[in-house]
């Protein structure tokens, strides 16, 4: 079906608008409006219409009842900024300009008057969906979290196709819902009521109000209203009138006094309250469209930027908000990237329909160009979903594959097959039609598919100088003096590792300071002690070990008390050759000496962690001795 034939399915009015020419021609009816609402860290099963039973989301559920709910829609990335880049550009993360969260500018840009901060910027002249619609006569506005460049940089939203922006330019600033300022069209706007740590004005409410104002202002011309809400991303903060609805319904873990991002004494009630407050705002947008008579000319889409998280006290296990999916935010397993997706367009999209079309965030740009009767760029990865939205499944073009990458993780979905490769290791293969939870790796049973996927991991992407697939790869990270070479090392066993986001035990001996082993902390929280056993390949005479804590800004899981063992049999360790305690949270190498001991295997047991967490994290392990 060619473009002319397809546009006829939208009705004679829209087809006439396309033929008539540019917006503004007196003979051309108004083009459809587009409202795209993007939640932040909302899980696949966080909504009532997707099976959530604890959190109330009546307005979003109503959108689903009045439109189409997708069961196999994917985010652009397991984390914030790259997902937003794929949304804006129609490119998956193997081709996108932004492939990870990278901070630029100062370290305290959320403090008024400090150096402005933000994330890696989009390049000048980037072909964004906002720019395409703006040039076609649409009013364009973004309200919420940007994360694709500092004000006045090439990534400034108003240099990337938006007429108006209100909200957080820097996504790190969005870690509080009570900021002392937000950004309006390139300028700081003070929120005096929140100065000096006061929590008086909830930023989400301000952002939602601006989206409503934009719709009212541009009701008489086509508009694209992009609403990337910050809820339910940490910190867990919500006004008391919303928290009260859930307070006391469930027991909460002991309050830690606000350490880290845990900023609420009843985090479960706070999380539920945040989601419900966002739901209320979605309802207000829907009600306004109805009030203004815009419903039948407006496509409304609601989705999330990635999977849920346990960070800051959010309790994914309690809410079961990843549903049956494996992994959470940060992971290329299904729980990190499969998200809710609801589309409503009265009179065009059939009500109360559920659709299993396999789609992704980068399909939004070509869907918009089809919707507006505009040429679709040829150099993108996205595929228009408009035939599916209109019930024309037989006219829908299908993806040959979907691709993601992040921090050395790669994933490809091709039909019902899903391949995952972490840190260039062995390819895992799952049949999602039979195993949505990705529990059964069937790679050994289908070597032909694994071979094909392996080739695709190399060919469906291009390398990025800024965002290399294996960032920070270094062969030597600890002191080299008398260090035993790691060439033949391998992990024999480990009691716990974070499969959901690739922080595996092997990261502790890979010679790369940018990776680390982290014990499970999302789907489960095993208690100390945690241990790792390593085979050095042959026996050495050892006299010490070296430990490098995780090298990012966090301290989660840094070892406090430890025990270290050496043996010639991986299953028979005697008494520890060293036992003690590390002090402080400095991200520097720690070296522990012990009496010379011969052995091929060593075991590190983390007996406790800084701050009392049940986790362990290790960037690198090394041993000192001689052959």
Image (tube, rainbow, N blue to C red):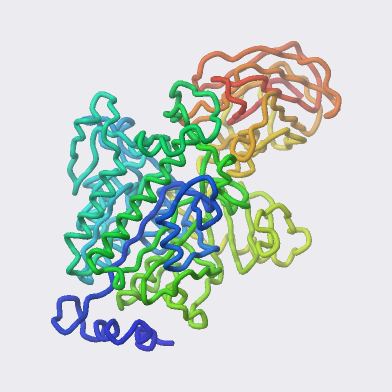
Kindly tell me whether residue 468 is visible in this rendering.
no
Q: Relative to 543, is 268 above or below?
A: below
The quarter of the picture where residue 294 lies is bottom left
Query: Which one is nearer the viewer's eye here, 372 or 508?
Result: 372
Query: On the rendered structure, is 282 left or right of 599?
Result: left
Query: Which one is nearer the viewer's eye here, 625 or 268?
Result: 268
Q: Position of residue 589 (x, y in %)?
A: 56, 21
Q: Quadrant of the N terminus?
A: bottom left
Query: Which one is nearer the viewer's eye here, 622 or 427?
Result: 427
Query: On the rendered structure, is 350 left or right of 254?
Result: left
Q: Position of residue 93 (x, y in %)?
A: 47, 57
Query: Which one is nearer the viewer's eye here, 568 or 255?
Result: 255
Query: On the rendered structure, is 546 left or right of 56?
Result: right
Q: Position of residue 333 (x, y in %)?
A: 60, 52
Q: Relative to 320, is 358 above or below?
A: below
Q: Which residue is pictured at 16% across the width and 84% down the height? A: 27
Kindly tell me whether residue 421 is visible in this rendering.
yes
Q: Which residue is pictured at 74% across the width and 31% down the height? A: 534
Q: Which residue is pictured at 28% across the width and 49% down the height? A: 208
Query: On the rendered structure, is 19 left or right of 533?
Result: left
The quarter of the picture where residue 560 lies is top right
Q: Position of residue 559 (x, y in %)?
A: 60, 22
Q: Quadrant of the C terminus?
A: top right
């Amino acid at each position: 079906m060619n473009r002319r034939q397809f546009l006829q399915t939208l009705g004679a009015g829209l087809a006439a608008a396309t033929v008539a020419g540019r917006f503004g021609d007196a003979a051309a009816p108004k083009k459809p409006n587009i409202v795209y609402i993007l939640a932040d860290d909302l899980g696949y099963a966080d909504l009532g219409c997707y099976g959530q039973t604890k959190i109330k989301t009546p307005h979003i559920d109503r959108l689903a009842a009045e439109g189409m709910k997708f069961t196999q829609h994917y985010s652009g990335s397991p984390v914030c900024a790259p997902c937003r880049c794929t949304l804006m550009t129609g490119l998956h993360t193997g081709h996108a300009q932004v492939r990870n969260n990278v901070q630029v500018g100062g370290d305290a840009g959320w403090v008024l008057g400090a150096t402005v901060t933000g994330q890696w910027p989009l390049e000048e002249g980037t072909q964004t969906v906002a720019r395409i619609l703006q040039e076609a006569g649409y009013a364009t506005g973004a309200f919420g979290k940007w994360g694709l460049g500092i004000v006045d940089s090439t990534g400034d939203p108003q240099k990337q196709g938006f007429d108006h922006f209100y909200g957080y330019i820097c996504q790190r600033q969005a870690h509080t819902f009570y900021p002392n300022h937000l950004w309006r069209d390139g300028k700081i706007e003070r929120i005096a009521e929140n100065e000096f740590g006061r929590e008086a004005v909830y930023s989400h409410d301000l952002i939602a109000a601006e989206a409503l104002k934009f719709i009212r202002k541009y009701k008489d011309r086509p508009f694209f209203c992009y609403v990337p809400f910050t809820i339910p991303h940490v910190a867990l903060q919500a006004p008391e009138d919303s928290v009260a609805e859930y307070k006391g319904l469930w027991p909460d873990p002991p309050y830690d006094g606000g350490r880290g991002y845990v900023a609420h004494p009843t985090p479960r009630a706070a999380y539920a309250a945040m989601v419900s407050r966002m739901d209320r705002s979605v309802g207000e947008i829907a009600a306004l469209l109805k009030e203004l008579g815009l419903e039948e000319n407006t496509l409304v889409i609601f989705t999330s930027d990635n999977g849920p998280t346990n960070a800051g006290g959010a309790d994914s296990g309690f809410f079961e908000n990843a549903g049956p999916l494996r992994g959470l935010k940060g992971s290329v397993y299904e729980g990190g990237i499969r998200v809710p997706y609801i589309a409503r367009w009265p009179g065009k999209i059939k009500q109360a329909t559920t659709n299993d079309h396999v789609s992704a965030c980068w399909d939004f740009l070509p869907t918009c160009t089809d919707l507006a009767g505009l040429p679709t760029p040829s150099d993108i990865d996205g595929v228009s979903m408009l035939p599916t939205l209109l019930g024309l499944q037989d006219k829908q073009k299908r993806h040959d594959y979907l691709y993601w990458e992040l921090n050395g993780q790669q994933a490809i979905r091709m039909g019902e097959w899903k391949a995952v490769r972490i840190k260039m290791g062995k390819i895992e293969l799952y049949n999602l039609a039979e195993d949505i939870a990705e529990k059964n790796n069937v790679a050994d049973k289908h070597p032909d598919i694994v071979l094909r996927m392996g080739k695709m991991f190399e060919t469906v992407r291009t390398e990025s100088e800024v965002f290399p697939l294996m960032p920070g790869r270094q062969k030597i990270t600890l002191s080299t003096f008398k260090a035993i070479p790691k060439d033949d090392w391998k992990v024999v066993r480990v009691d716990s590792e974070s499969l959901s986001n690739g922080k595996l035990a092997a990261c502790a001996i890979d010679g790369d300071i940018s990776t680390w082993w982290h014990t499970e902390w999302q789907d489960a929280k095993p208690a100390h002690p945690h241990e790792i056993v390593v085979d050095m390949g042959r026996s050495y005479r050892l006299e010490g070990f070296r430990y490098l804590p995780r090298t990012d800004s966090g301290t989660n899981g840094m070892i406090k008390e430890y025990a270290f063992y050496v043996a010639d049999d991986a299953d028979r360790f005697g008494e520890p050759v060293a036992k003690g305690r590390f002090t402080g949270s400095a991200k520097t190498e720690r070296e522990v000496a012990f009496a010379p001991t011969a052995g091929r295997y060593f075991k590190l047991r983390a007996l406790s962690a800084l701050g009392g967490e049940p986790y362990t994290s290790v960037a690198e392990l090394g041993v000192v001795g001689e052959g």
